[in-house]
Amino acid sequence: MRNVLSKFPVKKRRAVSQIMGSIVILGIVSSVGSVILFNGMNSISAFTYDLSFHEKSKNEIHREDIIFEHIRFVPGTDDITIDLSNIGTVDSTVSNVTILKIDTQEIIANWVDVEETILTKDHAQILLDGSDIVLTTGSQIWDDDYYEFSEYRISLTSAKGNFFTTVASPFNT
């Protein structure tokens, strides 16, 4: 008696085993992956190299930060004391101060040159006296009603070109 399957002769077929297929795929993926990895690393390296050509001063502009700690309008005079703190990561030099009376748009101090350097994590005090401040109305002191009940915009310009501003009023009125 013949085997039922004898009509269909059994052929010897050869196939790639699962282990060999996995090794071939792994080789392809790792070679393509390494090409992509090294290309990306070269791009990052080129970007870092390009950054090294930028001027140090331009990089430091973004790291400069000054805050106003206290503004004192000295009673009985036309003097102002401005206490500042450098909270940035680079030393700062305040080059100009401008003070504007907000309600009348009167310029009290116009681009006064101060050239005060504030080291990192340090404090400084700027004193503007009668030669820097122009009070033109009334008794020409901060106690005068014309000046006492107004707000003032105080603006600083640093040597690096940054601009810092605050609003203050005499005697916390």
Image (cartoon, rainbow, N blue to C red):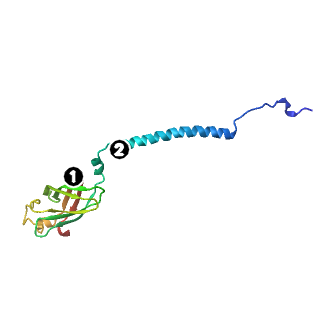
Q: Badge 2: few (under 14), some or many (20 or more) residues near its Cα, within 10 Å?
A: few
On the image, numbered disc 1 is attached to which residue? 159
Q: Residue at x 70, y 38 (%)?
A: 17
Res 107 seen here: no
What is the CA distance from the residue labelled 2 to the residue labelled 1?
23 Å
Q: Position of residue 117 (x, y in %)?
A: 21, 57
Question: Is residue 96 toward the left or the right of residue 53 in the image?
Answer: left
**In terms of depth relative to the viewer, which is nearer, 74 or 127?**
127
On the image, numbered disc 2 is attached to which residue? 51
Question: Is residue 68 toward the left or the right of residue 75 in the image?
Answer: right
Secondary structure beneath dot 1 equals loop
Question: Is residue 3 toward the left or the right of residue 162 in the image?
Answer: right
Checking the image for residue 76, the label placed there is: none
Along the polypeptide, which appears first: circle 2 or circle 1?
2
Res 27 seen here: yes
Quadrant location of the N terminus?
top right
Residue 26 falls in image quadrant: top right
Q: Is the C-beta separation of discs 2 and 1 under 8 Å?
A: no
Quadrant location of the C terminus?
bottom left
- What type is the residue that disc 1 sits on? Ala
- What type is the residue that disc 2 sits on? Leu
Q: Position of residue 25 (x, y in %)?
A: 61, 38
**In terms of depth relative to the viewer, which is nearer, 22 or 110?**
22
Note whether 28 is above or below 90 in the view shown.
above
Residue 13 falls in image quadrant: top right
Q: Residue at x 46, y 41 (%)?
A: 40
